Image (tube, grey):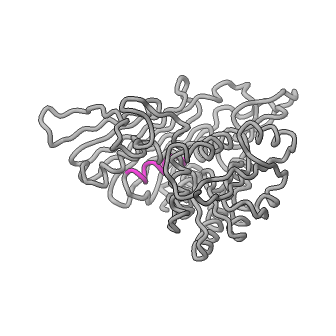
Amino acid sequence: MKPLIGVGLVGYAFMGRAHSQAWRNVTAFFDLPVTPSMAVLAGRSRERAAAAAAELGWAAVETDWRELVRRDDVQVVDICTPGDSHAEIAIAALEAGKHVICEKPLANTVAEAEAMAAAASEAAARGVRSMVAFNYRRVPALALARRFVAEGRLGEIRHVRAQYLQDWIVDPEFPLVWRLRKEQAGSGALGDIGAHIVDAAQFVTGQMLTGVSAITETFVKERPLAEDADGLSGGSRTGGRGKVTVDDAALFIGRFDGGALGSFEATRFATGRKNALRLEVNGSLGSLAFDFEAMNELWFHDETESDAGFRRILVTEPGHPYLEAWWPPGHGLGYEHTFTHEVRDFLAAVAAGTDPSPSFQDGLRVQRVLAAVEESAANESRWTPL
């Protein structure tokens, strides 16, 4: 029998469900030195949390995350709450000696992210591990893209083109959910989906952004109020309206520390685009392109070949990242598998006593980019160094 490691999940909505699936299934596909035990789920409503725990496979329920952190049967705290609570929960858990995995963006402000990174550094010295949950790093095609760049197959990186396009709030009568309130979400499309493409671009290229020039826009200024609304859907309307206090779209250009130029676009108003996270990287020896709406494909151009042009790589072979655990070649994976890969990497690092990646420090770097974008947009797109 492999040793058990008890997991406590805080939050049970969209991300909580995705993480629950990962904790439930990871050892069925990956051979790990430890076995996660889904010990407890925390939510403010006992009735709803109990229903979610029964559905998702959690053994117990708490209505206060502090009680979850104090439990002896919890060694890992998984934070799937809105951004305004990340810092308080993560710091308390790390100080209590619990390993932490925290949803992105790491925090709502740079100051919060700095405090979290400092707490993570102090905890690491005591053998306590932490990771920020940028799940798109675990898409096999993007992990393969990172491998290609690291192997030098693209040569000198010159251009990075990143987009994250959604359309779920195009309807002006879509309610004012928490993701549209700055006090809970920190920012809008910028933090919610822009954070993903910032991390993906830096992960794949191995380069860090050093400065940005940005614009942001809020297209729908007010929305209906609704009761029982979660982050992606609305409850019953109350009849009133409230102010949208975050961006609907963010566009910016940037420079990387390796000399590459970057362009970024994050919007929830790209009508017809459902979850189009796109990344193209151009180098002196080749290029690669990825679109999450075709997540099992990576397009690659090798400039050194005759009759050059992009060719499609179906990323489903056993030698591709993470694919050794799954299906025969040609049988594609889905969104949920990225979380299973995330949990697999986290548990492997915890068991080995090594620091998982991306770290809270990586999350802080992304947070500083988000803050620079907001600062630039507020100052007539002025160039803003990081």
The reply to whether the magenta stretch includes residue 295 is no
> Chief secondary structure of the magenta span?
helix
313 and 163: which one is in front?
313
How far across and how far down the image is residue 82, in percent? Answer: 71, 48
**Number of numbered discs on residues:** 0
Residue at (31, 40) in percent of width and height: 288
Residue at (53, 32) in percent of width and height: 275
How far across and how far down the image is residue 138, in percent? Answer: 47, 46
Residue 6 occupies quadrant: bottom right
Outermost residue toward the front in this view: 1
190 and 90: which one is in front?
90
Residue 289 occupies quadrant: top left
Q: Is residue 148 left or right of residue 66?
A: left
Residue at (54, 43) in percent of width and height: 28
Q: Is residue 171 above or below residue 230?
A: above
Q: Is residue 369 left or right of residue 77?
A: left
Q: Is residue 13 left or right of residue 236?
A: left
Residue 247 occupies quadrant: top right
Q: Quadrant of the N terminus?
A: bottom right
Residue at (36, 32) in percent of width and height: 329
**Which contiguous range is marked in magenta?**
195-204
Q: Is residue 257 above or below residue 51?
A: below
How far across and how far down the image is residue 140, in percent? Answer: 42, 42
How far across and how far down the image is residue 104, in percent? Answer: 60, 51
97 and 27: which one is in front?
27
The reply to whether the magenta stretch includes residue 201 is yes
